[in-house]
Structure formats: C-alpha cells, structure tokens
Image (cartoon, rainbow, N blue to C red):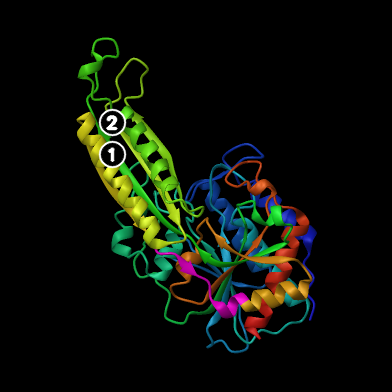
Amino acid sequence: MDFEIDGARLLSELETLATFSDSAAPAITRIVYSETDRKARAWLKDLCSQSGLAVREDAIGNLFARWHGTDPDAAAVGTGSHIDAIPNAGKYDGTVGVLGALAAIRALRAAQFTPRKSIELLVFISEEPTRFGIGCLGSRLLSGALSGAAAKRLTDRAGKPLEDFGDPENLALPTNYYASFIELHIEQGPILEKTGAALGIVTGIAAPAALRVLIDGEGGHAGAVLMPDRRDALLGAAEIALAVEAAARATGAIDTVATTGVCEVSPGAVNSIPSHVKLEIDIRDTDLARRDAVVKAVIQACETTAAQRKLQVKTEILNADAPAACDPQLIEVLTEACRAERKGFQRMVSRAYHDSLFMSRIAPTAMLFTPCRGGVSHRPDEYASAEDIVTGARTLARALAKLAA
C-alpha cells in the first residue's frame, strides 16, 4: 500500500506554526507556558480535532491525539515530538515530528487504511530546558523518570514553581500503554547531508548530564581593590568553563561533547568586580562511563578552582540520564519502510537527546531522522527541505501502518 503525503498542506502548517513566536521571523521563540505557546497548542489541538482525532491534554500540557483502532484494548502505536522552542531558534526542531506525524496519519486515512491498534500523536510539553532548566520535562513525567514530588520543586528564573502551570503528580503512563513509539525529527547534525542519505535510522541516543555551578567571590570597586586581593567570581567561572572543554577533549572520543551554555554574572557592572556567577553545563556522550568520567573531572576542576582562587563553589547535578538503545525490531521496521521508499538511508547515533530517550524506558522506541542544511539547528537559519520533510512523513506513515496493522 502506498501513502501520499499532502506536502503543500504540511509545509503550510509548518509556516503557520512558525507565526506563533515571540521573536521576529525567521527566528522562533516559543517558551513553554508563555501566552504564545498556549496559543500555538490551542491551534494544534484544533488541527488534530479537525483531522478526526480524539484529543486530550494531561495536567501539565502533554497533548494526546488518538486515531482509535479496531482493537481499542490493544496497546497503541505512538509517534510525536514537541513544539516549544528556545529563544531565537528555527522552525523545524520538534515541529517536523509533530506536524509530519499528523500528515502521516492523514495519509493513512486517505488510503483507507484501518488500524487494529490505535495510533496516537503525542506532543510533549517542555522538551527544551529553557524555562525550568531541565529538558524533556513532559516525557520524564510520563515515563516515571521524574517524580511528581521532584517536579514540584522546579522553578523558573522568575521563581515561579511548575505547580503554577499544572499538577505534575500521577502523570506516568500505565504499563504497556504504547506497543511502540517512533519519533520523526530533523537530524540537527551534518551527517546525512554529508553522506547524501535521505533518511537516518537512529540506533541509540546519547546520554545527557546537566550541572549547575554557583560561584561566590567578593565584589568591590573595580579601581580600588588591588589585583592580589581579588576574589573574582567571573575569573573562577572562566577557568571552570575552560576545564569543561578540556575534560571533553581529553576523552579522545568524537562522541564526547560538553558545553557551558549559561553564564550569569552579578552585579553585572563594568566598574564592579563580579561577586557571583551561575554556570549551567551540558555534558553528553553515547558511553555512560565516559560521560560520567567527564562529569567527575568537571566537579574536581570546580573544587580546585575554589581552593586556588579562594571562592565558594557549589556544584549541583541537575540530571544525569542513561543513554538509550533503540529497539531492534523497530529499527528493522524503519529499514523496511526506507527501502520501500527507495531512498538512501543510514543507521546512526543521535548526539542530541530527545523525548524518545525517556519513552524508551516504557516502550520499544526508535527515531527517524531527516537531513537539515549544514547540520544547523537551534538557530534562525535552521532549514529542512520540503522534499526531505515529505519523505520523512511518508516513511513514518509506512512504519505506522506496519505497526498498527
């Protein structure tokens, strides 16, 4: 059975979703629970309802849009991604996996396919860590990787607790809720474009860890405090950031990456010695032991810097997740679908992490990648071609049909 994706409609919907943004085009800013995010999710719910799907929303905003199968008691086939976006991002991260999945479901309907297992589109809340400092919030709660009690302790930068936006208790999905889960996503890397492959079948997802480092020194007048007497928090932070880079490079593995992505300096005046700095550090690897060794090296560097510069340094591990292996049977299903499409494909590792990392804890999970130009993501110039997006959606449709039959 062949399935035709309405490419014009899919691309139009991607463009419409991009208009829900707090930054000017081509940049996209859609922070979770902002008014813009709420409007985007309301639009998406309407879109799913118009497509004949039964829509529900849980207590923190995860959206579920279900096409009921002939065996409603069977575990469902899940697919989906996210629509929240970091500041000044692009229009394809997450959204291709949401609207592409919706287009795939429409294609199955148009082909008169009858699913035995229900097919459900899941739109995760807060995949990005922008607001609460922790990524994949929705999928962590759905998988039980994060407890409701722990989630209640999360606050945003304004000090607002997660509870102000919804109740995170009792959200874990029942055992065997999903028979399988596939996430369609742009690669966010350059490999597919470099090799000329139209599709990537993910075999494993790298393990992320996030650290928060609080550095306290002693402020003072920039002209009056002599250099030998200084306890400059920013200089300590700079040494730690360089140590993060050095620890990642020291593994010698291409899959080890580390980033100091947040550096907040107080008081933030040109003529005042920095007295306090907050760093947030992201460390990832496909190998758990190697990733943990880098985390240990960074913590040791914090301790060394504190002693040498007479600073108070507090290090907190926000999360340290295990890598995920994609399900071998789902990898074969995606392989068959790629071959049926007569498109070049390759098996690969995802160095970015996704909600699928946590869904793999409760269901057989796999990911399907489409190329993005230059491997660019999380930037306004993020771009995926119409042809590649449609190919990804059509391949996903084939896989869903196989799994739901």
Q: CA distance from mark 2 to mark 1?
A: 7 Å
Q: Residue at x 59, y 38 (%)?
A: 23
Looking at the rendered structure, the kind of residue marked 2 is His
Instruction: Tell whether 287 sits left or right of 389.
Output: left
Where residue 201 appears, as percent x and y from the top left, is 63, 67
Q: Is residue 331 above or below residue 137?
A: below
Label 2 sits on residue: 276
- Where disc 2 sits, the SS reads strand
- Image quarter in which the N terminus is found: bottom right
| Quadrant in the picture for residue 88 | top right
Magenta stretch: give its range. Answer: 322-331
- Where disc 1 sits, the SS reads strand
Q: Is residue 318 above or below residue 342?
A: above
Where residue 107 appears, as percent x and y from the top left, is 75, 72
Looking at the rendered structure, the kind of residue marked 1 is Leu
| Quadrant in the picture for residue 279 | top left
Where residue 151 appears, as percent x and y from the top left, is 33, 59
Q: Which residue is at the front of the view, 319 or 60?
A: 319
Q: Residue at x 44, y 50 (%)?
A: 129
Where residue 55 appears, as percent x and y from the top left, is 57, 70
| Image mark for residue 214 | 1
Residue 321 visible, this orientation:
no
Asked if marks 2 and 1 touch (Cβ < 8 Å), the reply is yes
Of labels 2 and 1, earlier in sequence is 1
Residue 138 visible, this orientation:
yes
Instruction: Tell whether 229 sits left or right of 375.
Output: left
Q: Residues within 10 Å of mark 2 (few under 14, many from 20)?
A: many
| Quadrant in the picture for residue 174 | bottom left
Q: Residue at x 61, y 52 (%)?
A: 189
